[in-house]
Image: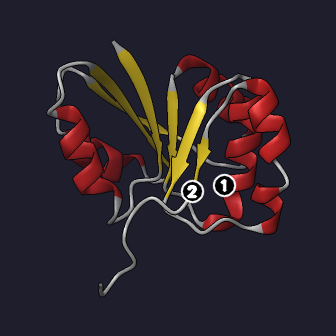
Amino acid sequence: MQRILVLGAGLVARPLVRYLLDQPDFHLTVASRTVSKAERMINGHPRGQALAFNITDADTLQRLVAEHDLAVSLLPYVYHLQVAQACIAHRKHMVTTSYVSEAMRALDGAAREAGTTILNEIGLDPGI
């Protein structure tokens, strides 16, 4: 079973969480500063768990990334770099809906060397 970590439980997370929980081959962890939002999204599903998480807790970020196969960062874009660095360190894949910043672009070589895919700009802009 693939383990997927979703960081953030804002409005864009809900459809993704519901879709992934409907897939039988995934176990989903939703980690959010506001754990009650994550709990409502998981809604007691047997293959889901909600965790309290603050991006400023670097040790927990490292542990969570290491325990999962894929990280989906739905945090504000300024935090994607931290998530990407953890994913590269643990050779885990990452996706996000945010644009590719210069700082993220600078990680390309390290990600390739680690065999890690860091995929940005996955999704549609609001209003399209």
Side of 127 relative to 97 (left or right): left
Rendered residue at 77%/40% (across/down): 85
- Residue 125 spot, x, y in % from top left: 40, 78
Crowd tier of the residue under label 1, counting other residues whose Cα lies within 10 Å: few below 14, some 14–19, many 20 or above:
many
Rendered residue at 60%/69% (across/down): 99
**Quadrant of the image occupied by residue 20:** top left
- Residue 18 to residue 50: above or below: below
Is residue 19 among what the camera can see? yes
The tag earlier along the polypeptide, 2 or 1, is: 1
Side of 42 relative to 65 (left or right): left
Q: Which residue corresponds to mark 1?
A: 80
- Quadrant in which the N terminus is drawn: top left
**Quadrant of the image occupied by residue 12:** bottom left
- Asked whether disc 2 touches disc 1, contact meaning CB atoms under 8 Å apart, the reply is yes
Is residue 89 among what the camera can see? no
Q: Which residue corresponds to mark 2?
A: 120
Hey, what amino acid is under mark 1?
His
- Residue 105 spot, x, y in % from top left: 78, 58
Hey, what amino acid is under mark 2?
Asn
Crowd tier of the residue under label 2, counting other residues whose Cα lies within 10 Å: few below 14, some 14–19, many 20 or above:
some
